[in-house]
Image: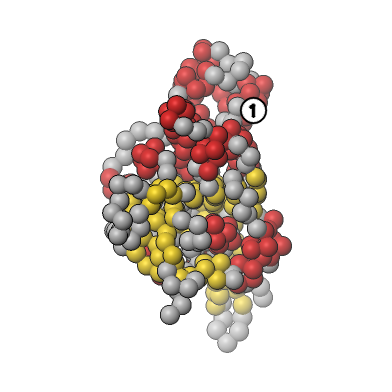
Amino acid sequence: MLICLIGVVVEVMLGCASIHFVYIYIMLLTTTTHPFKYIPRIIYKQVTVTYQSLDLLQEHGVAANDIQKLNDAGFHTMESIAHSTVRKLSEVRGLSEAKVVKLKDIVKQLVPMEFKTAADALEDRKQLVTLSTGSVELDKLLEGGIETGSLTEVFGEFRTGKTQLCHTLCVTCQMPISEGGAEGKAIYIDTEGTFRPQRLQGIAERFGMDPAVALENVAYARAHNSEHQTELLKMAAAIMSQDRYALIVVDSATALYRTDYSGRGELSERQMQLAQFLRQLTRLAEEFGVAVFMTNQVVADPGAMSFAKDSTKPIGGNIVAHASTTRLRLRKGRGENRICTVFDSPTLPEADCQFAVGPSGICDASE
Protein backbone atom coordinates (compact mmCIF):
# COMPACT_ATOMS: atom_id res chain seq x y z
CA MET A 1 0.00 0.00 0.00
CA LEU A 2 1.39 3.41 -1.00
CA ILE A 3 0.10 6.76 0.20
CA CYS A 4 1.67 10.07 -0.85
CA LEU A 5 1.47 12.99 1.53
CA ILE A 6 2.80 16.29 0.22
CA GLY A 7 3.66 19.24 2.43
CA VAL A 8 5.60 22.45 2.40
CA VAL A 9 7.98 22.56 5.33
CA VAL A 10 10.51 25.35 5.08
CA GLU A 11 10.41 29.02 4.30
CA VAL A 12 13.57 31.11 4.55
CA MET A 13 13.89 34.87 4.27
CA LEU A 14 17.08 36.13 2.66
CA GLY A 15 18.33 39.71 2.55
CA CYS A 16 16.20 42.54 1.26
CA ALA A 17 14.53 40.47 -1.44
CA SER A 18 12.86 37.52 0.24
CA ILE A 19 13.75 34.16 -1.22
CA HIS A 20 11.59 31.20 -0.29
CA PHE A 21 13.04 27.73 -0.33
CA VAL A 22 10.20 25.29 -0.65
CA TYR A 23 10.85 21.62 0.08
CA ILE A 24 8.19 19.17 -1.01
CA TYR A 25 8.30 15.86 0.78
CA ILE A 26 6.68 12.58 -0.20
CA MET A 27 6.01 10.37 2.79
CA LEU A 28 5.86 6.73 1.77
CA LEU A 29 3.49 4.69 3.87
CA THR A 30 4.33 1.03 3.24
CA THR A 31 3.69 -2.35 4.77
CA THR A 32 6.95 -4.23 5.17
CA THR A 33 8.49 -5.88 8.18
CA HIS A 34 7.76 -2.59 9.96
CA PRO A 35 4.05 -1.84 9.33
CA PHE A 36 3.12 1.80 8.74
CA LYS A 37 6.72 2.96 8.61
CA TYR A 38 7.22 6.50 7.22
CA ILE A 39 10.17 6.99 4.88
CA PRO A 40 10.73 10.70 4.11
CA ARG A 41 12.49 11.60 0.87
CA ILE A 42 13.10 15.01 -0.68
CA ILE A 43 12.11 14.66 -4.31
CA TYR A 44 11.83 18.23 -5.49
CA LYS A 45 13.29 21.56 -4.50
CA GLN A 46 12.06 24.83 -5.88
CA VAL A 47 13.29 28.38 -5.28
CA THR A 48 10.94 31.31 -5.73
CA VAL A 49 11.38 34.99 -5.01
CA THR A 50 8.89 37.24 -3.25
CA TYR A 51 9.74 40.73 -4.38
CA GLN A 52 6.44 42.26 -5.37
CA SER A 53 5.44 42.85 -8.97
CA LEU A 54 4.17 46.24 -10.14
CA ASP A 55 1.01 44.50 -11.32
CA LEU A 56 -0.19 44.72 -7.71
CA LEU A 57 -0.66 48.45 -8.26
CA GLN A 58 -3.70 47.75 -10.43
CA GLU A 59 -5.49 46.44 -7.33
CA HIS A 60 -4.96 49.88 -5.78
CA GLY A 61 -6.37 51.91 -8.64
CA VAL A 62 -3.22 52.56 -10.70
CA ALA A 63 -3.86 52.45 -14.46
CA ALA A 64 -2.18 49.76 -16.57
CA ASN A 65 -0.64 52.36 -18.91
CA ASP A 66 1.00 54.11 -15.93
CA ILE A 67 2.49 50.76 -14.85
CA GLN A 68 3.82 50.30 -18.37
CA LYS A 69 5.45 53.74 -18.20
CA LEU A 70 7.20 52.69 -15.00
CA ASN A 71 8.41 49.46 -16.64
CA ASP A 72 9.75 51.39 -19.61
CA ALA A 73 11.67 53.65 -17.22
CA GLY A 74 13.32 50.68 -15.49
CA PHE A 75 10.99 50.17 -12.51
CA HIS A 76 9.78 46.57 -12.32
CA THR A 77 9.04 45.88 -8.66
CA MET A 78 7.30 47.56 -5.75
CA GLU A 79 10.66 47.72 -4.00
CA SER A 80 12.16 49.76 -6.84
CA ILE A 81 9.41 52.35 -6.35
CA ALA A 82 9.87 52.36 -2.58
CA HIS A 83 13.64 52.87 -2.84
CA SER A 84 13.43 55.72 -5.37
CA THR A 85 12.99 59.41 -4.58
CA VAL A 86 9.96 61.44 -5.61
CA ARG A 87 12.23 63.49 -7.87
CA LYS A 88 13.47 60.39 -9.68
CA LEU A 89 9.96 59.08 -10.20
CA SER A 90 8.82 62.48 -11.44
CA GLU A 91 11.30 62.10 -14.31
CA VAL A 92 9.22 59.22 -15.72
CA ARG A 93 7.55 60.55 -18.84
CA GLY A 94 3.77 60.80 -18.48
CA LEU A 95 3.60 60.68 -14.66
CA SER A 96 2.42 63.84 -12.94
CA GLU A 97 3.60 64.85 -9.49
CA ALA A 98 0.17 63.97 -8.06
CA LYS A 99 0.43 60.44 -9.49
CA VAL A 100 3.93 60.03 -8.08
CA VAL A 101 2.79 61.07 -4.59
CA LYS A 102 -0.10 58.60 -4.84
CA LEU A 103 2.31 55.86 -5.91
CA LYS A 104 4.60 56.49 -2.96
CA ASP A 105 1.66 56.40 -0.54
CA ILE A 106 0.49 53.04 -1.92
CA VAL A 107 3.93 51.46 -1.92
CA LYS A 108 4.63 52.69 1.61
CA GLN A 109 1.82 50.44 2.83
CA LEU A 110 3.11 47.37 0.97
CA VAL A 111 6.92 47.54 1.39
CA PRO A 112 8.23 47.58 4.98
CA MET A 113 10.84 50.29 5.46
CA GLU A 114 10.59 50.97 9.20
CA PHE A 115 13.09 50.39 12.00
CA LYS A 116 13.77 46.88 13.28
CA THR A 117 15.82 45.62 16.18
CA ALA A 118 19.46 44.63 15.87
CA ALA A 119 18.41 41.13 16.90
CA ASP A 120 16.11 40.90 13.88
CA ALA A 121 18.87 42.23 11.63
CA LEU A 122 21.21 39.53 12.99
CA GLU A 123 18.68 36.81 12.21
CA ASP A 124 18.33 38.15 8.67
CA ARG A 125 22.08 38.04 8.16
CA LYS A 126 22.27 34.45 9.41
CA GLN A 127 20.09 33.47 6.47
CA LEU A 128 22.25 35.11 3.79
CA VAL A 129 23.46 32.81 1.02
CA THR A 130 27.09 32.91 -0.14
CA LEU A 131 28.43 31.80 -3.52
CA SER A 132 31.41 29.46 -3.63
CA THR A 133 34.46 30.76 -5.49
CA GLY A 134 35.63 27.26 -6.43
CA SER A 135 38.53 27.38 -3.95
CA VAL A 136 38.16 25.98 -0.44
CA GLU A 137 40.78 28.32 1.00
CA LEU A 138 39.28 31.39 -0.67
CA ASP A 139 35.82 30.43 0.60
CA LYS A 140 37.26 30.16 4.11
CA LEU A 141 38.80 33.61 3.81
CA LEU A 142 35.41 35.03 2.75
CA GLU A 143 33.54 33.03 5.42
CA GLY A 144 31.61 31.01 2.88
CA GLY A 145 32.10 32.87 -0.38
CA ILE A 146 30.72 35.91 -2.18
CA GLU A 147 27.83 37.41 -0.22
CA THR A 148 24.41 37.92 -1.81
CA GLY A 149 22.51 41.16 -1.34
CA SER A 150 25.63 43.31 -1.48
CA LEU A 151 28.37 44.58 -3.81
CA THR A 152 31.79 42.92 -3.90
CA GLU A 153 34.68 44.57 -5.75
CA VAL A 154 37.84 42.73 -6.80
CA PHE A 155 40.83 44.62 -8.18
CA GLY A 156 44.35 43.84 -9.28
CA GLU A 157 46.78 43.88 -12.19
CA PHE A 158 46.24 41.88 -15.38
CA ARG A 159 46.54 38.08 -15.07
CA THR A 160 45.62 38.02 -11.39
CA GLY A 161 42.45 35.96 -11.91
CA LYS A 162 39.70 38.60 -11.86
CA THR A 163 37.91 37.47 -15.02
CA GLN A 164 38.43 33.79 -14.20
CA LEU A 165 36.75 34.36 -10.85
CA CYS A 166 33.82 36.00 -12.66
CA HIS A 167 33.45 32.97 -14.95
CA THR A 168 33.61 30.51 -12.05
CA LEU A 169 30.93 32.36 -10.07
CA CYS A 170 28.59 32.27 -13.10
CA VAL A 171 28.60 28.48 -12.76
CA THR A 172 28.73 28.02 -8.98
CA CYS A 173 25.75 30.35 -8.45
CA GLN A 174 23.61 27.75 -10.28
CA MET A 175 24.51 24.93 -7.89
CA PRO A 176 22.34 23.82 -4.94
CA ILE A 177 22.59 25.88 -1.77
CA SER A 178 23.98 22.87 0.09
CA GLU A 179 26.92 22.82 -2.35
CA GLY A 180 27.80 26.52 -2.20
CA GLY A 181 25.42 27.87 -4.82
CA ALA A 182 22.18 29.86 -4.82
CA GLU A 183 20.15 27.93 -7.39
CA GLY A 184 19.86 30.96 -9.64
CA LYS A 185 20.95 32.29 -13.01
CA ALA A 186 23.67 34.85 -13.73
CA ILE A 187 23.92 38.13 -15.65
CA TYR A 188 27.31 39.02 -17.16
CA ILE A 189 28.06 42.57 -18.38
CA ASP A 190 31.35 42.54 -20.29
CA THR A 191 33.06 45.88 -20.92
CA GLU A 192 36.48 44.60 -22.04
CA GLY A 193 35.58 41.77 -24.43
CA THR A 194 37.04 39.04 -22.21
CA PHE A 195 33.95 36.85 -21.75
CA ARG A 196 34.53 33.31 -23.07
CA PRO A 197 31.51 30.92 -23.02
CA GLN A 198 33.73 27.89 -23.67
CA ARG A 199 35.36 28.63 -20.33
CA LEU A 200 31.98 28.14 -18.67
CA GLN A 201 31.67 24.73 -20.30
CA GLY A 202 34.88 23.47 -18.68
CA ILE A 203 33.88 24.86 -15.27
CA ALA A 204 30.41 23.29 -15.53
CA GLU A 205 31.92 19.87 -16.33
CA ARG A 206 34.19 20.17 -13.31
CA PHE A 207 31.17 20.61 -11.03
CA GLY A 208 29.19 17.82 -12.67
CA MET A 209 26.74 20.12 -14.44
CA ASP A 210 25.38 19.93 -17.97
CA PRO A 211 27.44 22.52 -19.93
CA ALA A 212 24.53 23.33 -22.25
CA VAL A 213 22.23 24.08 -19.31
CA ALA A 214 24.92 26.14 -17.56
CA LEU A 215 25.35 28.32 -20.67
CA GLU A 216 21.59 28.82 -21.02
CA ASN A 217 21.49 30.11 -17.43
CA VAL A 218 23.94 32.96 -18.10
CA ALA A 219 22.61 36.15 -19.74
CA TYR A 220 25.51 37.95 -21.46
CA ALA A 221 25.81 41.46 -22.91
CA ARG A 222 28.77 43.40 -24.30
CA ALA A 223 28.79 47.05 -23.18
CA HIS A 224 30.31 49.42 -25.76
CA ASN A 225 30.29 52.70 -23.82
CA SER A 226 29.50 53.96 -20.33
CA GLU A 227 25.97 55.05 -21.30
CA HIS A 228 25.24 51.62 -22.76
CA GLN A 229 26.67 50.06 -19.61
CA THR A 230 24.11 51.95 -17.50
CA GLU A 231 21.29 51.10 -19.91
CA LEU A 232 22.10 47.42 -19.53
CA LEU A 233 21.24 47.64 -15.84
CA LYS A 234 17.68 48.62 -16.77
CA MET A 235 17.51 45.56 -19.02
CA ALA A 236 18.93 43.44 -16.20
CA ALA A 237 16.18 44.60 -13.84
CA ALA A 238 13.55 43.59 -16.40
CA ILE A 239 15.13 40.16 -16.83
CA MET A 240 15.46 39.51 -13.09
CA SER A 241 11.82 40.40 -12.47
CA GLN A 242 10.84 37.44 -14.66
CA ASP A 243 13.04 34.66 -13.21
CA ARG A 244 15.29 33.71 -10.32
CA TYR A 245 18.77 35.24 -10.64
CA ALA A 246 21.56 34.98 -8.08
CA LEU A 247 24.47 36.95 -9.57
CA ILE A 248 25.31 40.08 -11.56
CA VAL A 249 28.87 40.33 -12.90
CA VAL A 250 30.35 43.57 -14.28
CA ASP A 251 33.81 43.03 -15.78
CA SER A 252 35.02 45.68 -15.45
CA ALA A 253 32.94 48.42 -13.88
CA THR A 254 35.40 51.26 -14.53
CA ALA A 255 37.09 50.52 -17.89
CA LEU A 256 34.65 52.44 -20.11
CA TYR A 257 34.52 55.42 -17.77
CA ARG A 258 38.30 55.75 -18.07
CA THR A 259 38.06 56.01 -21.86
CA ASP A 260 34.80 57.98 -22.20
CA TYR A 261 36.02 60.71 -19.83
CA SER A 262 39.57 62.00 -20.03
CA GLY A 263 41.56 64.69 -18.29
CA ARG A 264 40.93 66.60 -15.10
CA GLY A 265 38.30 68.73 -16.79
CA GLU A 266 35.96 65.73 -17.10
CA LEU A 267 36.93 64.06 -13.81
CA SER A 268 33.98 65.48 -11.87
CA GLU A 269 31.47 64.38 -14.53
CA ARG A 270 33.06 60.92 -14.70
CA GLN A 271 32.84 60.41 -10.96
CA MET A 272 29.22 61.58 -10.87
CA GLN A 273 28.17 59.17 -13.65
CA LEU A 274 30.15 56.34 -12.06
CA ALA A 275 28.44 57.00 -8.73
CA GLN A 276 25.02 56.77 -10.42
CA PHE A 277 25.98 53.43 -12.00
CA LEU A 278 27.20 52.02 -8.69
CA ARG A 279 24.05 53.21 -6.94
CA GLN A 280 21.94 51.29 -9.45
CA LEU A 281 24.04 48.19 -8.86
CA THR A 282 23.52 48.47 -5.11
CA ARG A 283 19.78 48.94 -5.62
CA LEU A 284 19.58 45.77 -7.74
CA ALA A 285 21.52 43.81 -5.10
CA GLU A 286 19.09 44.87 -2.38
CA GLU A 287 15.95 44.66 -4.51
CA PHE A 288 16.50 41.17 -5.93
CA GLY A 289 18.82 39.72 -3.27
CA VAL A 290 21.55 38.94 -5.81
CA ALA A 291 25.31 39.04 -5.37
CA VAL A 292 26.88 41.85 -7.39
CA PHE A 293 30.48 41.07 -8.31
CA MET A 294 32.48 43.70 -10.18
CA THR A 295 36.10 43.92 -11.22
CA ASN A 296 38.18 47.08 -11.13
CA GLN A 297 41.40 48.17 -12.79
CA VAL A 298 44.44 49.58 -11.01
CA VAL A 299 46.91 52.40 -11.60
CA ALA A 300 50.39 53.05 -10.28
CA ASP A 301 50.35 54.81 -6.93
CA PRO A 302 53.01 57.58 -6.99
CA GLY A 303 52.65 58.00 -3.23
CA ALA A 304 53.53 54.37 -2.47
CA MET A 305 57.01 53.28 -1.46
CA SER A 306 59.02 51.89 -4.38
CA PHE A 307 59.93 48.79 -2.34
CA ALA A 308 56.32 48.02 -1.36
CA LYS A 309 54.82 44.64 -2.35
CA ASP A 310 52.12 46.30 -4.40
CA SER A 311 52.54 49.91 -5.47
CA THR A 312 49.21 50.10 -7.31
CA LYS A 313 45.82 51.35 -6.22
CA PRO A 314 42.29 50.76 -7.56
CA ILE A 315 40.83 53.48 -9.74
CA GLY A 316 37.57 55.26 -9.00
CA GLY A 317 38.72 56.88 -5.78
CA ASN A 318 36.35 57.29 -2.85
CA ILE A 319 33.28 56.86 -5.06
CA VAL A 320 34.07 53.17 -5.66
CA ALA A 321 35.48 52.67 -2.17
CA HIS A 322 32.27 53.80 -0.46
CA ALA A 323 29.95 51.96 -2.86
CA SER A 324 31.64 48.56 -2.41
CA THR A 325 30.63 46.50 0.62
CA THR A 326 33.60 44.16 0.33
CA ARG A 327 36.87 44.94 -1.50
CA LEU A 328 39.35 42.22 -2.46
CA ARG A 329 42.87 42.74 -3.82
CA LEU A 330 44.39 40.09 -6.09
CA ARG A 331 48.05 39.76 -6.93
CA LYS A 332 50.27 37.23 -8.64
CA GLY A 333 51.93 34.41 -6.74
CA ARG A 334 54.28 31.66 -7.82
CA GLY A 335 53.34 29.92 -11.08
CA GLU A 336 49.56 29.75 -11.47
CA ASN A 337 48.99 30.65 -7.82
CA ARG A 338 47.34 33.93 -6.91
CA ILE A 339 47.00 35.77 -3.60
CA CYS A 340 43.72 37.31 -2.42
CA THR A 341 43.73 39.93 0.36
CA VAL A 342 40.68 41.32 2.13
CA PHE A 343 41.27 45.01 1.48
CA ASP A 344 38.09 46.34 3.12
CA SER A 345 35.03 44.72 4.64
CA PRO A 346 32.51 45.50 7.41
CA THR A 347 32.71 41.91 8.72
CA LEU A 348 35.80 40.11 7.38
CA PRO A 349 39.18 40.55 9.10
CA GLU A 350 42.18 41.72 7.10
CA ALA A 351 43.83 38.52 5.93
CA ASP A 352 44.94 36.77 2.77
CA CYS A 353 45.07 33.33 1.19
CA GLN A 354 46.33 31.62 -1.93
CA PHE A 355 44.30 30.10 -4.75
CA ALA A 356 45.06 29.01 -8.30
CA VAL A 357 43.73 29.56 -11.80
CA GLY A 358 43.32 26.21 -13.53
CA PRO A 359 41.83 24.86 -16.76
CA SER A 360 38.46 24.57 -15.01
CA GLY A 361 38.37 27.98 -13.33
CA ILE A 362 39.35 28.96 -9.80
CA CYS A 363 40.70 26.14 -7.62
CA ASP A 364 42.95 25.57 -4.62
CA ALA A 365 46.60 26.59 -4.82
CA SER A 366 49.25 24.09 -5.79
CA GLU A 367 52.37 23.59 -3.73
Task: Identify the residue shown where x is 63% and y is 39%.
Answer: 224
Quadrant of the image containing the N terminus: bottom right
Residue 314 visible to the viewer: yes
Looking at the image, what colour scheme do you see? secondary structure
82 or 90, which is in the foreground? 90
In the shown orientation, is residue 108 left or right of residue 206? left
Q: Disc 1 on helix, strand or loop?
A: helix
Residue 209 can be seen in this image: no
Indicate the quadrant containing the C terminus: top left, top right, bottom left or bottom right: bottom left
User: What kind of residue is marked 1?
Assistant: Asp
- Provide residue 58's location: percent of width, then percent of height: 61, 25
**112 sits to left or right of 238:** left
Residue drawn where x is 47% and y is 35% of the image: 274
Q: Is residue 337 left or right of residue 38?
A: left
Classify 96 as above or below 72: above
Residue 123 locus on image (x, y percent): 34, 52
Q: Which of 223 and 135 lies nearest the eye of the viewer?
A: 223
Look at mark 1 in the image and give the residue it sits on.
72
Label 1 neighbour load within 10 Å: few <14, some 14-19, many 20+:
some
